[in-house]
Amino acid sequence: MVRKTIEVLDELWREFEIEAVKKFGHYGAIKKATEEAIKLWLEKQKKKEQQ
């Protein structure tokens, strides 16, 4: 497991945080949503490369 620090626009982060808690509940929501977002982004990039 790795820990990273990133900078994100305040409004974007707040919206992400709200949606993450709605989907996953309070405990571990940010971690789960971040992992899901990274996986989806990687899948999208791989599909682009295959075209």
Image (cartoon, rainbow, N blue to C red):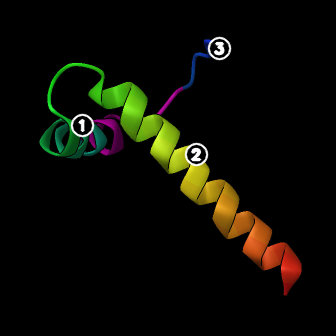
- Indicate the amino acid at tag 3: Met
> Which-is-in-front pick, marks 3 and 1?
3
Tell me what residue is drawn at x 25 percent, y 40 percent: 20
Judge whether 13 appears above or below 30 on screen: below
User: Could one spot residue 41 in this view of the protein?
Assistant: yes
Q: Count of labels shown?
A: 3
Q: Does the magenta-highlighted stretch encompass residue 42?
A: no
Residue 15 versus residue 21: which sits nearer the camera? 21
Q: Quadrant of residue 26?
A: top left
Magenta region: 7-14
Q: Quadrant of residue 17?
A: top left
Quadrant where the N terminus sits is top right
The residue to which callout 3 is attached is 1
Q: Main secondary structure of the magenta part?
A: helix
Tell me what residue is drawn at x 62 percent, y 16 percent: 4
Residue 3 versus residue 28: which sits nearer the camera? 28
- Indicate the amino acid at tag 2: Ile
Are the residues tagged 3 and 2 within 8 Å (C-beta)? no
The residue to which callout 2 is attached is 38
